[in-house]
Amino acid sequence: MDTATAPALLYEQIAQHYLGAIRSGALQPGARMPSVRTLTQLHSVSLSTALQACRWLEDQGWLEARPRAGYYVRRPQRMALPPSSEPPARIDATQYLGIHERVSDFIARCELHPVRVNFANAYGSPDAYPAAALTRAATHVLRQHPDLLVTPVPPHGDAGFRSVLARRALDAGMRLTPDDIVVTHGCTEAMNLALRAVTQPGDMVAVESPTFFGLLQILQSLGLRSIEIPTSPQTGISVEALSLALQTQPDIRAVVVVPHFQNPLGSVMPDANKAALAALCAQHDVALIEDDTYAALGDDATPLRALKSWDDHGAIIHCASLHKILAPGMRLGWISGGRWHARIRMLKYAQSRPNDTLAQRSVADYLGSAAYDRHLARLRRLLRTRREQVAEAIATHFPAGTRLTVPHGGMLLWLQLPPLRRNATVFETALREGVRIAPGHIFSNSERYNDYIRLNSSIPFDTQAVSALQRLAEIVRSQLA
Amino acid sequence: MDTATAPALLYEQIAQHYLGAIRSGALQPGARMPSVRTLTQLHSVSLSTALQACRWLEDQGWLEARPRAGYYVRRPQRMALPPSSEPPARIDATQYLGIHERVSDFIARCELHPVRVNFANAYGSPDAYPAAALTRAATHVLRQHPDLLVTPVPPHGDAGFRSVLARRALDAGMRLTPDDIVVTHGCTEAMNLALRAVTQPGDMVAVESPTFFGLLQILQSLGLRSIEIPTSPQTGISVEALSLALQTQPDIRAVVVVPHFQNPLGSVMPDANKAALAALCAQHDVALIEDDTYAALGDDATPLRALKSWDDHGAIIHCASLHKILAPGMRLGWISGGRWHARIRMLKYAQSRPNDTLAQRSVADYLGSAAYDRHLARLRRLLRTRREQVAEAIATHFPAGTRLTVPHGGMLLWLQLPPLRRNATVFETALREGVRIAPGHIFSNSERYNDYIRLNSSIPFDTQAVSALQRLAEIVRSQLA
């Protein structure tokens, strides 16, 4: 509101300003109106003008005066209720130019509809995680460190948390010191930092095909081009195909790989392939970025060796996180940057400063305890049981021609549907009915996966989930080509 | 460790792997060694080889066997203690290419020396914030929402937190709905997102001179060029100088301004200047990015009008945060992106996903209460008292020729020293003695502020602080040109 240019009376301008705030919900029923004294200062007006504005709002039924307490926004009368706001008719795709319109459109669309059954995310269901233990741990930290919330955060992350991460990394065959680790806001920020550290805008990055849509967004938003490398549902990225790409595409500066329980395929690279991949990247002097977020989720408890355990030249960047395996509500990730580590530290500082301490310290003790191992054992069993239940329901209800490789870990199923008239219709129809899925076309820049969908198989297998799967199968049938 | 290439015996390789981990601190004294069974799986060796590796480490005094519990890392014997590690002799500046080497070097250098008295940061001292109330609020949220830590975070930030931010924004003359706000990891992430939303690499951004060094890092790390606009210690950025720059530099795409208690100057823009600045940017169709983190810290409690309150075209992006005014340990910031808001939402999603809920919900109730206003009143008094104490100590001890405009709010003093032989020596000498200051040359890409330093005046004014200021004055004297 610019009081210098508007033609209305001063008190009217002020009243309209606050009326707009009430109508938009910024000032909600029951909220206190700024005091008359505050209004005089804020709008540089006299006491009588400020009072006149409040009285006008009171007369119109928007405010009520309470003795000695000032003005408050009135509870709305029934007849004054505005109609519910409609969701925007269409999404403005021009806003997403350069961020990956296809993925942005999917995410924005999801928010327009209330969700009843969510098969679209890549987290385990909340009941799969140790809520009570984490809450206890956080409460304990708050009690032990009364100044934690008012003390500036230390660089690179909490020392105790990094220490236990370094110790746990041994199980994956990596030898890291706490100083080799920078804590990040989830694996997403770690991937951003890794790519920013090793590339320049315009560079090319080799990715798995299909790959998780978040990566496609990151690449495009950083001005990077991607080249999609064929990836097997069983053994992960094809090292042979990558080798060919590296020979023919000199612009490739980095390779991004999810070696274990790849998203969306669920594939696991055999150790021989990991060794060959590491050697290939070293030979071509290309950075190898490993997203190892799902490693702990195998049906078999045998620890899987991280790609970084084959790192002889500091050329492998290891990224991982806890939101899939321990705490979806605490976005804790980390990065170990090899020869680019100092650069990554500084990019993290420039991008978002170090993480808050509370979450890190809360999980540090838990991660070092046997309770964590017991949690993982339970989580693995739960994911396996539900995965098999969902896979069986799919086999029962989906039309002939549906294909699925059931992975040996994780919570994701990558479903190949029979040829459809329009894959997007399956997603859109389900979404309108409150059933959220991830449509195949967001996992690639090509049209290769238009007949695929990704389903999260970790949600409780109850009647609601079963009927959602049945309904999904019906929608698919209705779209058969 | 690649078992395929090393010539040593298998058990030796495994033992060396874990020995390295113990020496580096990744496996600390008292930690449990992975079980023999785990070792067989992890390294694909026989039970006897795994056992041989453990026994070798035991024989060498690194492990101890505990009956039925496996092997543990031994507490070090006195004579086995390795010498303390030395800080790296020099910092590898090539790592920081494109991030702003000058600033990166300052930050990395600070970490090499333990700090006794810290005048370098831009937070209030922890005793200036309501630690107990925040801890209580966080504990309460954890109790009320037992599944909070295991539930995926909602998009754009907690609805209740955004709601109270929208209400508080009214005091600054802005009319925002909760949906106009995206919660970010501090103001730093908000600034990154704002700049990414409105610029392309290679574009030019107008900034205040001097400006806070974090901004210079952000600009360079995003491939942006900056043009420094003269800024008054009293009235902030010169609108006239900016006008001239906009006429002569068609590449300018955005202007970044801290209108209230600018960092490092402490200046406050008069309302007329803010209106003129908003009009100027609208006229040139240039995005105006407002960093309004310090607005609540004025000695005078009168609310200050945000630049965004003059926004008629959605062309002003408002960024702010709570870590200076409420909770340095909770990195809560937010952004209101005007016409770029949908784009900023998606960039935030691609860069780090939405923020954790706990911190947001913890402060939401507090922000809406009268306790918050009481905290601000106390904080303002405390900052004013200490600022005047430090300013007086400077006047007493620093050499003639020292200049200082004492601001009317905030915690920063921007000190112009008499001409020095080498400003960097003041910073380096103080740093080695445990007194951390922010040297002037990191607040600009020019050499214009080489004789300035920025001091945080909010630390408790005790004998340690006074003697640090006296020592600083001595060091300055020793460097007089």
Image: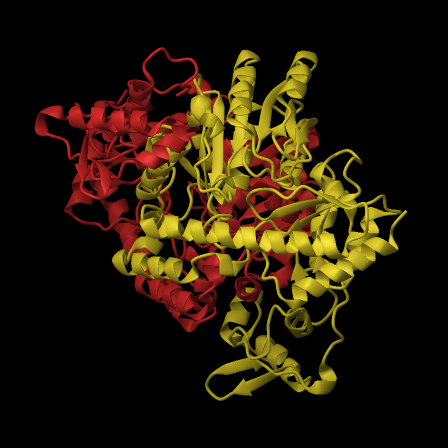
Chain colours: A red, B yellow
Question: Residue shown at 48%/20% (left/top)?
Answer: B315
User: Relative to A50, is B133 above or below?
Assistant: below
Q: Nearer the viewer, residue B409 or A84?
A: B409
In percent of width and height, residue A433 lies at: 20, 31
In percent of width and height, residue A122 lies at: 37, 44
Of all residues shown, which one is farthest toward the bottom?
B67
In percent of width and height, residue A49 lies at: 31, 24
User: Relative to A358, is A252 above or below?
Assistant: above
Instruction: Examine the rendering and report whether any part of residue A314 can be seen.
Output: no
Question: Residue shown at 86%/46% (left/top)?
Answer: B420
Q: Nearer the viewer, residue B357 or B455?
A: B455
**B68 left or right of A182?**
left
Residue A89: image quadrant is top left
Question: Residue shown at 87%/56% (left/top)?
Answer: B478
Instruction: Examine the rendering and report whether any part of residue B471 can be seen.
Output: yes
**Number of numbered markers:** 0
User: Relative to B237, is B22 above or below?
Assistant: below
Quadrant assignment for the N terminus of chain B: bottom right
**A382 left or right of B274?**
left
In percent of width and height, residue B445 lies at: 75, 34
Q: Nearer the viewer, residue B15 or B168?
A: B168
Residue A56: image quadrant is top left
